[in-house]
Image (tube, grey):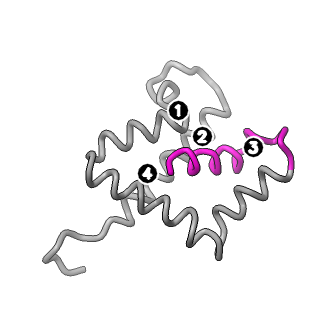
């Protein structure tokens, strides 16, 4: 699931521009309703389950590695615009996943 999420984010920021319209259409279908309910949303759920089983630290570090931004966020990539765009997408995904987590059992919203 992380590779599919990373691919979609990379296409949306323009890293796969040379692949043309098919790459963009694939990412658009993956991320837009109604197909996103059976594609991206299930990948979000799989990542959340992985975070529950493996721990959030392991999943976030793996997510940053799959997005290819771990070196950029550590300060070793310089002024790479592509890495910066991917870092924004990766951190947006982390925030999105963190806000989708249901409250612990017994707590009322």
What residue do we see at 27% from left, 55% from top? 52
| Horizontal side of residue 98 vs 82, given as left or right | left
**Farthest residue, direction bottom:** 108
Q: What crowding class fits label 3: few (fewer than 14 Cα within 10 Å), some (14-19), or many (20 or more)?
A: some
Q: What crowding class fits label 2: few (fewer than 14 Cα within 10 Å), some (14-19), or many (20 or more)?
A: many
Identify the residue position indicated by label 3 in the image: 14
Identify the residue position indicated by label 2 in the image: 86
Is 40 located above or below residue 35 in the figure? above
Q: Looking at the rendering, which quadrant does residue 18 occupy?
A: top right
Secondary element at image label 1: loop
Q: Is mark 2 in CB contact (under 8 Å) with mark 1?
A: yes
Q: CA distance from mark 1 to mark 4?
A: 13 Å
Q: Earlier in the sequence, mark 3 or mark 4?
A: 3
Q: Earlier in the sequence, mark 1 or mark 3?
A: 3
Identify the residue position indicated by label 1 in the image: 69
Q: CA distance from mark 3 to mark 4?
A: 20 Å
Secondary element at image label 3: loop
Identify the residue position indicated by label 4 in the image: 94
Residue 49 is situated, as x and y percent measured from the top left of the image, at: 34, 58
Please check the rendered image and state whether residue 15 is part of the magenta-colored stretch, yes or no: yes
Q: CA distance from mark 4 to mark 2?
A: 12 Å
Secondary element at image label 4: helix
Q: Is mark 1 in CB contact (under 8 Å) with mark 4?
A: no
Q: What crowding class fits label 1: few (fewer than 14 Cα within 10 Å), some (14-19), or many (20 or more)?
A: many
| Horizontal side of residue 96 vs 29, given as left or right | left
Q: What crowding class fits label 4: few (fewer than 14 Cα within 10 Å), some (14-19), or many (20 or more)?
A: some
């Amino acid at each position: 699931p992380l590779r599919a999420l990373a691919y979609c984010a990379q296409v949306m920021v323009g890293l796969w521009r040379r692949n043309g319209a098919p790459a963009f259409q694939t990412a658009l279908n993956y991320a837009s309703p109604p197909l996103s309910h059976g594609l991206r949303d299930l990948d979000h759920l799989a990542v959340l389950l992985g975070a529950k089983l493996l721990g959030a630290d392991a999943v976030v570090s793996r997510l940053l590695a799959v997005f290819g931004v771990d070196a950029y966020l550590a300060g070793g990539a310089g002024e790479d615009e592509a890495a910066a765009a991917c870092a924004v997408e990766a951190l947006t995904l982390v925030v999105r996943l963190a806000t989708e987590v249901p409250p612990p059992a017994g707590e009322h919203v």
